[in-house]
Amino acid sequence: MSKPQVSVCIITCNQQNYIRQCVESVLMQAEDVSLEILVGDDCSRDNTSKIIAELVAENPHLIRHIRHESRQGACRNSQVILALAKGQFVAHLDGDDYWLPGKLKRQLAFMMASPGCAAVYTNALTVTESGGAIGLFNDVGDQCFDLSALLRKGNFLNASSVMMRAEVVAQLLEIEGQFIDYRAHLRHARKGFIAQLGQPLVGYRINSVSSMVFNSNDQVRSLYWDAIMDVPRELVTDLDFARGLADFFRRVTFRAIKLKQWGLLRDWAPSVFQASPFGAIRTTLLISWAIMRMTCVELVGRLPIWTPRRHTKVLYRR
């Protein structure tokens, strides 16, 4: 096909219950945007591959099925199909999520009007495994962020909502081993500002059977740390870097309290204080502020007066 405006990269593995809705939600976008769909099928052993093959037969001019015969892992699977993308822009979608009508059209219009934007995200509706409504992914709204702001605030962007410029893909292909979406977000921010459209245009399944956050939280925490350490120090101030570390330890603290796993604090405190450019007292104050601020944000955000009736829960508050 001729060069599309957008290459949509879907990664999947054993997601027979979700993959049809996922791909069909992308096909709906073809009415608004010239696109190609690349589906990275990581050695699925259920009916996922069969369903994809059926969709390819119905839409051979739009969908390409890249099936790995041996398990690659989500990160390598993603890198393989990213390397095949031909579009001026590249969008990512996990196989258990889906898009809402008009998503790519809105993002494409934003990117065309914003040459300094490296990647644009949208908010998302959080849903159960069966698709039941839960709430919103975040409470950020329409905002733009640079690398320093994204480091200070931590990860709150929805990976299945991203549209990036093709020229920023190369830096994702350079990453060796496993990585989480936050590391990708931070790398995007090296190339320009990051934007979020506040309108929820993605359906994001919480704690699905394939969720890494749900099944491998300790690994996610380690990879989150790697994402922070991956930020070139010359691109951010000492204060912004220290605030990023403080927000990380705030997340560790909240997790330790929730699960009563106090060993998490003992495990991570030495790394945080050693990596901080400041002394123990100032680092402790930054951590304390991060904990107090987010505690207040969470408490205020849960008051009925601040919560729209149709979105009773917010997954990430900032």
Image (cartoon, rainbow, N blue to C red):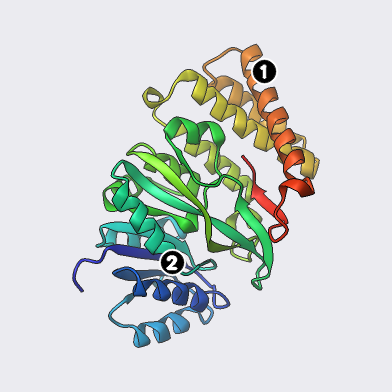
Quadrant of res 79: bottom left
**Residue named by callout 1:** 285
Give the camera-side residue of 109 and 239. 109
In primary-sequence order, the first of circles 2 and 1 is 2
Residue 214 in view (yes/no): yes
Quadrant of res 102: bottom left
Residue shown at the point (63%, 24%) measured from the top left: 270
Q: Secondary structure at mark 2?
A: loop
Query: Label 1 sits on what residue type?
Result: Leu
Q: Is residue 272 left or right of residue 86?
A: right
Which mark is on residue 236? none
Task: Please provide percent x and percent y for residue 181.
Answer: 48, 49
Residue at the extreme left = 2
**Residue named by callout 2:** 102
Can you tell which of label 2 and label 1 is closer to the viewer? 2
Residue 77 in view (yes/no): no
User: Looking at the image, is 16 positioned above or below residue 101?
Assistant: below
User: Looking at the image, is 259 positioned above or below residue 40?
Assistant: above
Q: Is residue 188 left or right of residue 61?
A: right
Residue shown at the point (53%, 43%) measured from the top left: 223
Give the camera-side residue of 170 and 261. 170
